[in-house]
Image (tube, rainbow, N blue to C red):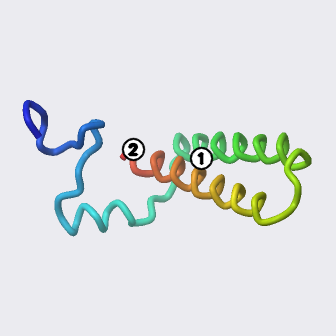
Amino acid sequence: MEGGDAGVDFRGRKLVRTKEEAIEHFRYKSPCDVTAEKHQKVTEAFIGVIESLWDAVPDGPGKTYALRKLADARMSFNSAIANNGQ
């Protein structure tokens, strides 16, 4: 990376360079009081989205797909919290 930190990507995210770093990213991290509160905020936000859109979207594969994408996004937000933004 020209002129930048070789340990981060173009977005400033830390690069995983070793097997140990990769394993640590996947290791379960118990929430502490601070992170548990943040996880709860994420959950409440996604519940709000589902509640506001449920009746507007007809049942079917499109709705199922959208719900799966929301679940993926929720997991990504919670992973970012658990991994301190990484």
Q: Quadrant of the N terminus?
A: top left
Q: Quadrant of residue 85?
A: top left
**As displayed, is residue 45 above or below residue 28?**
above
Q: Nearer the viewer, residue 13 or 55?
A: 55
Residue at 78% in and 41% down: 48
- Pointer 2: what residue? 84
Classify mark 1: residues with Cα within 10 Å, few (<14), some (14-19) or many (20+).
Answer: many
Q: Nearer the viewer, residue 57 or 50?
A: 57
The spot of residue 7 in percent (x, y) is: 15, 45
Q: Quadrant of residue 5?
A: top left
**As shown in the figure, which amino acid type bears the numbered disc 2?**
Asn
**Element at label 2:** loop
Q: Residue furthest top?
A: 3
The spot of residue 22 in percent (x, y) is: 28, 64
**As shown in the figure, which amino acid type bears the numbered disc 1?**
His
Q: Residue furthest right?
A: 55
